[in-house]
Image (cartoon, rainbow, N blue to C red):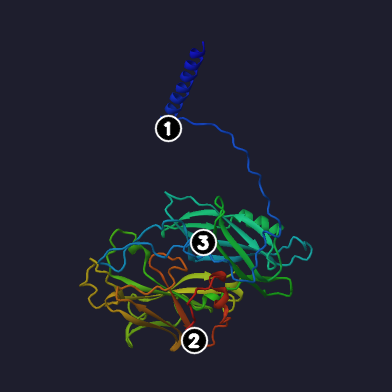
Amino acid sequence: MKGMIILRGMLSSLTAIAILFLLAADGSAQFNIKLPKIPKVEKTAEETKTDVSQPPADVTSSQTRAASNSTKQSSDKPYGMVEWPDRPQMVWDTLYIQTENSRNYWKMQNQKPTSWVPKIRFSMDYNPDKFSPDYVAEYFNPDGSLWFSEHLRNAGSGALKQIGFESNSEVTNEMRDTRSTIATGVYGFKLSEKNTKQTLFQGKFRIGKFPLPGNDKNVVEFFVDHDWVMPVGFISFHFSEFLRPNALGGFPLEFNMWFKKYLAPNNHGMEAQLFYNGKQIGTTADYHSGFQPEEERSSSQGHIYSPDLHNWRLWKMIWQNVIVDNNGTYNREVRNRSFLIDKNPGEYTVKVFQKGGQIREAKFTVGSDGRIADPFSKQAYLTYHKVIVPITVIGPAEKYNVNAWKTEAFYGNPLTGFAMP
């Protein structure tokens, strides 16, 4: 009897082992084990505070920020096809915060003063087949306390193949009716991925106001101060050149600068000249070259009632005869008089004139590799080989805070090594 009990025990053990072996071999088998729920920890008001008077936490480290312009570089070409980054990246020059003004204030219904709430938009660079991030914006009062948060709307992609995110109009309207304010000052914000809670970007923005026409002192226009953009310029090329596997070459140089005054689309009186080793190699006065408006940063009434004081405009200048050869296969005979910047390393100077008087100047360098030097690529993520260049603003015509860029550039994220010439 004792031997039979031992034998049965051995058979039971062998049966159990066999069952475990079969379950391990069958990938479709699942163990339904109920785990205890992790209690949800609610944040206190003190934990949601942020110090908007201080520079935001570093969000540009190598742990969270990839270098700009991830490319598939060809050994014989300075510029190659632009590829997706290895993780979602916010394109810094697309971030824009502005006010939503309303002739209503929920705390003073009878007096009808103007109040405001913020709204935000930006573009993300990532492969939509691999990633599907979701973003939340948090806004903080000048004292650092949490004001409100919102789930941002995915606006889809456009020609640039970037995914846009922006404030949801329904949320903006709800906050306008229940959380708007009539205060000015420096406010904070933080962008986070909704599911992972990872911080994407953190910064601050300054709110000002100016009176609107009429006798009612309560009717004003609140706006986000963008004086920090004035010394920030961009060199770029048309994005379409870098969407094909083999960039052909022969693409012209483009330069973007900000202006804080009204400029008529056609009769602006501006000319941009480009110099290399002291010799002029291009002017926007040439055929097919010129200026064109790119972007406007203004509150809804700022460009109408205060176009020279509370409205910032980005203009693009193009020199069609100054191109990147890129060892390309374009028709060189058609463009045989062009200046090839990638074949001429050294320092270049841009001078902008309006009606004969100089109003801007900038310098950039082309390296021996044929590429425009990009000292800020690991701090501010940009795409399609765009490069940040410091701009010198000349003359007193444009009224702005000349020191704003030192602390407020890129919404409180000034670049290390960037200096207004």
Q: Label 2 sits on what residue type? A: Ile
What amino acid does circle 1 point to? Gly
Q: Position of residue 390 (x, y in %)?
A: 46, 78
| Chain-order first, disc 1 or disc 3 | 1
Tell me the residue that label 3 is attached to: 122
Q: Is residue 18 above or below residue 161?
A: above
Determine whether, in the image, residue 246 is placed left or right of residue 273.
left
**Which residue in the rendered view is the most extreme toward the right?**
110
Q: How far from the left and from the top, in percent, is residue 156?
A: 48, 54
| Dot 3: element | strand
The label number, if any, that marks residue 229 in the structure image = none
Q: Hey, what amino acid is under mark 3?
A: Phe
Which residue occupies the extreme top position in the image? 1
Q: Which residue is mark 2?
A: 394
Disc 2 residue crowd, few under 14, some 14–19, many 20+, Cα 10 Å: some
Judge by depth and name the residue closer to the eye, 291 or 324.
324
* Position of 144 relative to 40 (above/below): below
Q: Nearer the viewer, residue 91 or 42?
A: 42
- Going from N to C along the chain, the mark reached first, 1 or 2, is 1
In this figure, which residue is indicated by the disc labeled 1? 27
